[in-house]
Image (cartoon, rainbow, N blue to C red):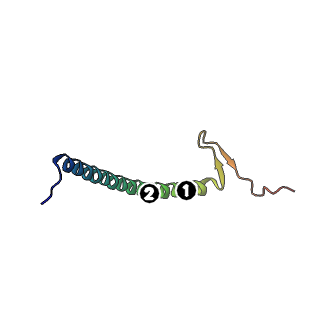
Amino acid sequence: MSKLEDNELKVLRESIEAINSLQMKIGGLESQKHDLLHEISISAESFKKLQSTLEEKYGNVSIDITTGEIKEEDGDSKED
């Protein structure tokens, strides 16, 4: 029965181990991606609630997020 040389077998095993290791890393990254997407969804929902609360309190305005300055939105910004 034919058999691979020891060094060929070693290289073959190392290649397979490298591929398996990379696949495991990809799986870990996909899991992290899933968790982060879930966190984004939660943050977006929280932002929508805050936005709604601020709109109820201040109306339809623009807020400078650097200074907190509130500017009234122009209801009719049509140009003649």
Quadrant that contains the C terminus: bottom right
Residue at the right extreme, as displayed: 80
Determine whether, in the image, residue 73 is placed left or right of residue 13.
right
| Residue 28: % across, % down | 32, 53
- Disc ID at residue 66: none
Q: Name the residue under label 2.
A: 42
Which residue is the site of mark 1? Answer: 53
- Crowding at label 2, few (<14), some or many (≥20) Cα neighbours within 10 Å? few
Residue drawn 16% across and 47% down? Answer: 6
Whole-angstrom CA distance, mark 2 to mark 1, is 17 Å
Q: Nearer the viewer, mark 2 or mark 1?
A: 2
Q: Residue furthest bottom?
A: 1
Q: In which quarter of the image is the N terminus?
A: bottom left
Relative side of 52 to 59, left or right: left
Element on which disc 1 rests: helix
User: Which amino acid type corresponds to the residue marked 2 in the rendered image?
Assistant: Ile
Return the x and y of residue 36 as percentages of the image width and height. Answer: 41, 53
> Which residue is drawn at the image coordinates 28% and 49% (left, top)?
18
* Residue at the outermost front position: 1
